[in-house]
Amino acid sequence: MPDDRTPRRLVPGLLSVLGALGAIALVAGGIMLDRSYAQARGQALDGAQRSARTQAAALDTVMAIPPSQVRFVAGHAQTRRALAARQRDARSLSTILGRARRIDSDLTGLISVIDATGTERVRQQGDRILPGGSRSVAASTWFAPTLAGTAGAVHRDPPQVSLESRIWILSTSAAVRQGAQALGVVQLETPLEALRRRWTAGLPAGAEARAVDPRTGTVVLDSTRPTPLPGPADDLITQWLPRDRPMTGSVAEDLERVGSATTGAGWRVDVLAAPVAVPDQGRTLITAGILLGLAVAVITLARKAFHAEPVRASLPRPRPASEATTAAAEQDQHAQRQTTDTEEGEQGRPEEPGEQGALVSDGTRSLTGG
């Protein structure tokens, strides 16, 4: 007769195999996940480095526009004649300044022509041409270095707050020279916010980038927030842009997610890589291992519940027929032995004197007390 317990004996082995497969899937998934995640992080950082170089080149392209404007005005013959003749008529330079502004009107905040004494001769702000003569810029940080520069050389100051427009600007200036003589300076103020909008317009969707000036340790341009505006009561001379801090909030995480490149002006462009997603391969194996483990647990619990014996504390367990017959025979033998022993004891015991009595009519002995 076949043993119906054979399939039951196979269940523990099957559970062991499933448990081993689940453990192998978990370990393999963890290893694959770790390797895939490291590879994905490396690829993300490489992408951020390439993007940083691309954005640094794009920023160089944008920042090359203001120098071209001041070179155009400083190198024009009409500008040299006006400064050499000490003319104060704004109309003589309005055409030149208007043409310079049309090179890129969005990046042209204020453009001025200043003579060698530091006195402003003419200024264009927006569409307006304003005569100078009342403003001296001789004490400005950019004036003396620019005046001492060679023909065609461009001087650029760190970002500052304009005393005229009260916004953050980038000052670009060039000397007007006639031979060895410095006739004056052309200065252009480029609003940082206009520069930021122009630069960030070319960023990929969702990308985060910034430009940092290492000389001042400040964030000059930031794709995630506009350029701050000074308050009406703030000291414009000592205003500072936001400080250079980790983009992710952690230096260690910046090393893994931020790519950097340097512009021609010496600014550092940082690009933040997108967060790395969990690779599908390792995640699939880990999920399979978890499911196998759950299956083993469910099957084990179900097997224990199915084979559990019911508790019958109030009812005695019935004995087999062979055991009952044997027990009855033993009880008969025990009763016969007790009867034999009783008869033998009565025959051998003598009568006591006080136990004599009279026979009654039914043949039994009547006991009398002595």
Image (tube, rainbow, N blue to C red):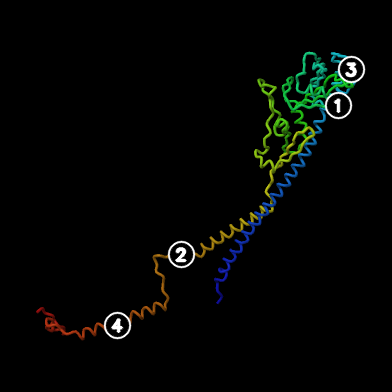
Q: Which mark is residue 152?
A: 1
Closer to the eye: label 1 or 3: 1
Q: Secondary structure at mark 4?
A: helix
Measuring from the top left, give residue 294's x and y in whole percent. Answer: 58, 57
Q: Secondary structure at mark 3?
A: helix
* Circle 2 residues within 10 Å: few <14, some 14–19, many ≥20: few
Quadrant showing the N terminus: bottom right
* Residue in the picture at 73% in, 47% down: 43
Q: Are marks 1 and 3 in contact (CB under 8 Å)?
A: no
Q: Which mark is residue 337?
A: 4
Instruction: Compute the Cα span from label 1 to label 4.
Output: 141 Å
Instruction: Compute the Cα span from label 1 to label 2.
Output: 103 Å
For badge 4, the amino acid type reads: Arg
* Residue in the picture at 20% in, 86% down: 348
Closer to the eye: label 1 or 2: 1
Pointer 2 or 4: first along the chain: 2
* Circle 1 residues within 10 Å: few <14, some 14–19, many ≥20: some
Q: Which mark is residue 310?
A: 2
The residue wearing badge 3 is: 81
Residue 170 lies left or right of residue 31; in this view the side is right
